[in-house]
Amino acid sequence: MNKRSISLLFTMLMMAGCSKSNNTPQPQPGGHSFLIFDGIHYANKPDLQPEGLLPLNLVYANRLVSPNPADNTQFLPDTVKIKAVATQYLTQPNVPVTLDIESWSYATNALPATISKFKQVVNTFKNINPAVKLGFYGVVPNDRYDWNNIQPVGGSNYLQWQRLNDAMIPVAQSVDLFFPAVYTFDTDTTAWKQFTAASIREARRYAPGKPVYAYIWPQYHDGTPLSLQFVDPVIWRCELETLYQLADGCVIWSGNKGVNGTIQWSNDMPWWQETRNFIARHQLH
């Protein structure tokens, strides 16, 4: 049995055991490209490029927008700031960029202005730096956090979500990459996989040829019963394997806070060991 067959067999066995859901993605014959980007912010984290992770530039809203002079509770694209960021990354044309703006409303009456502002950000950036590939975090498709907020497929909440995603088509057309967020809220892998599959389907519906890189976090989302605890390594493995089948890659993101304060990097963290095993198993590096 060659290495490719062993990898496929292992994936099939692992995915069969990680959930009893009928929605488990089925492994496809042979290997394929899958990129893993480094958005990890644990203290003393080493350069992970030798391990197979790729650099990514994540730009938060404070570097892209400023308060509206007429209403300082609202924010507008700041052309000076955006041009400065775009100029900074001229020397890194092959490093993708995620733009993270989470303050604009998706309410029906505000949506036209929101779409216009997102497009203004992209156009201003691209006028300075047309080479870089960029996308918005959790915008297209719109981030609904977990499966409970949109299920079931075809239900009223799901259809409402799709209508919003349809309205955001002008933004989807303006970007090069899609960055859906599929963080972990609990130990229900079935619900996580359903939500992840739905999010990636929506991204593919916009443009089948544009890469989809899902944001994942090796900790449970804050504000949940398991807040900031590390995701169980078996669940983490399941998530990586699911994304391997559905997406073009993932962004492993983290802050630096844990249950007991600042998290110090360790090569022995179980989730990281699972990540290294995943990279080796699929010969991604």
Image (tube, rainbow, N blue to C red):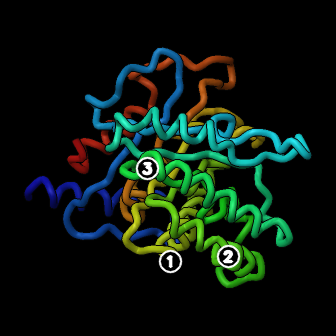
Give the mark nearest the N terminus, 1 or 3.
1
Q: Which mark is residue 167?
A: 2
- Which residue shows up at 22% across the image and 60% down it? 31
- How many numbered tags mark residues here? 3
Give the mark nearest the N terminus, 2 or 1.
2
Q: CA distance from mark 2 to mark 1?
A: 13 Å
- Answer with left or right where residue 170 lies relative to residue 235: right
Q: Quadrant of the N terminus?
A: bottom left
Q: CA distance from mark 1 to mark 3?
A: 19 Å
Q: Which mark is residue 186?
A: none
Where residue 87 appears, as percent x and y from the top left, is 46, 36
* Three-letter code, disc 3: Cys
**Residue under pointer 1:** 205
Secondary structure beneath label 3 = strand
**Residue under pointer 3:** 250
* Three-letter code, disc 1: Arg
The reply to whether residue 76 is visible in this rendering is yes
Where residue 180 appears, as percent x and y from the top left, is 56, 57
- Answer with left or right where residue 225 lies relative to residue 31: right
Nearer the observer: mark 2 or 1; the answer is: 2
Nearer the observer: mark 1 or 3; the answer is: 1
Asked whether 22 or 58 is in front, the reply is 58
Give the mark nearest the N terminus, 2 or 3.
2
- Which residue shows up at 75% across the image and 69% down it? 112
Mark 2 Cα-neighbour bin, 10 Å: few <14, some 14–19, many ≥20? some
- Which residue shows up at 58% across the image and 41% down it? 82
Secondary structure beneath label 2 = helix
Nearer the observer: mark 2 or 3; the answer is: 2
Q: CA distance from mark 2 to mark 3?
A: 25 Å
Q: Are marks 1 and 3 in contact (CB under 8 Å)?
A: no
Asked whether 100 or 259 is in front, the reply is 100
